[in-house]
Image (spheres, rainbow, N blue to C red):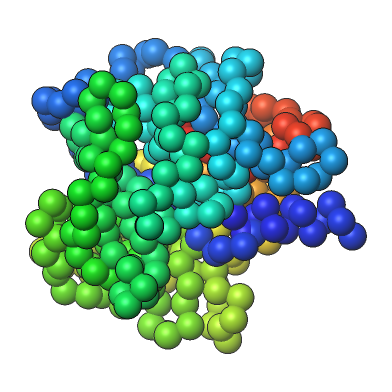
Amino acid sequence: MRRSFVLLALLTACDGDKAPSTDDTAAEVVPVEGCRATPLPKSAPRLVAASLPYTASGAAADSWTLLQLKDETLSATGVTFEMGRGGGDAVVWSPDGSLGVAVQDDGSLGVFTAEGEVVHAAWSEGLYAGDVMFDPKGETLWVIDGNWVENGGGVYEVGVDCATGALSLVGLVVQSKLGEHLLGDVLIADAAAQTITLPGGALGQTTDLFGHEDAIVGGAARRGDTIYVGDNSAFSSEPNRVAVASVGDTITPLGLFDVYDPYAIVAVEGGAIVSSGFGDEIIAVGAEGVLDVMPSELPGAVTLGPDELALVAEVSGVRLVRLEGGALVEIGFFDTPALEDMIGSLGVQP
């Protein structure tokens, strides 16, 4: 969302400071029974949901489109639909890839099918969604409301109808202050991390990630037992950093590395790929520190496709990048030359 604000400022001369979290906790695929649990074949093409937050004149738009990722190439499908405006926040798919859910600029959830049919243009039920995560069965959504506790902040359970994909609020699971991301069984809230048991909501010991009270969480991601969390506060005397920590019975800090404006993060084998929005860079970070840097043009949302392929939304397109041997390698680029084709939010089928 903050990125959209910056783009609009550029057009005329990203409210919010966080972007989607990504969670790749499974070392192997474990069969799960559920109405939306069966994964797509590994070799199948993937759909990529993308918001189109601007009209040709630069006005705000509520448009969305479906792209296709096949053989490491991104292409248009021609499928478009209208929901709420997506400025760079989370887009997640059910485990079987049949249903997508997008966090929108007004805190509502847009829900759509793989065919581009809209189930909910703007679902909220009084929540102000900041991040969402599907359960492995595809029958439940865990939704973070990032408010303070007294204003409804917490993790909520939302049911997903097996037949229609319609959402229904089940209720509050656990209260939290300034919740930002869910990374499997880890809750990122108020610039700290703690384990969370779902659906019960039991919370473990809190681990401070940044060591100062002015941190504001940007992107966050998880790979196995390692989490990567970015602080992109513009109001702190401390530099922006990415915290790396290990998840076990407790959460153990592994490192804290200077990275300017870590707006969005995906975790891959060997580290994490970070979108540095104001830094105009894509940065690879590992447990030992910064691994590599690639120039980029105001990068925003990042999503992770098959075979460790990261898709990074930029001003004029989507850059396809992979981390290979500690180095960032560009695999391809999908052009979006027109203003109305510029991409805000981005999410690929699992």
Report the residue at 60% width, 48% height from top.
87
Give the quadrant of the C terminus. Answer: top left
Q: Nearer the viewer, residue 101 or 117?
A: 117
In the image, 157 versus 253, the foreground residue is 157
Where is residue 227? Give x, y as percent: 32, 57
Residue 192: percent from the left, percent from the top? 32, 72
Q: Is residue 174 left or right of residue 66?
A: left
Location of residue 345 (image quadrant): top right
Instruction: Work out whether 49 lies above or below 39.
Output: below
Q: Nearer the viewer, residue 345 or 280?
A: 345
Position of residue 196 measured from the top left corner of the image (x, y, whole percent)? 17, 60
**Observer able to see residue 114:** yes
Q: Is residue 21 above or below residue 257?
A: above
Q: Quadrant of the N terminus?
A: bottom right
Q: Residue at x 46, y 17 (%)?
A: 115
Q: Is residue 197 left or right of residue 212?
A: left
Using residue 199 as the reference point, say whether residue 227 is left or right of it.
right
Q: Is residue 3 left or right of residue 119?
A: right
Q: Position of residue 48 (x, y in %)?
A: 51, 27
Q: Specify the quadrant of the image occupied by residue 55.
A: top right
Which residue is situated farthest in the right direction here? 13
Picture residue at 58% right of the left edge, 86% below the top: 237
Q: Is residue 242 visible?
A: no
Number of numbered discs: 0
The answer to which quarter of the image holds residue 40 is top left
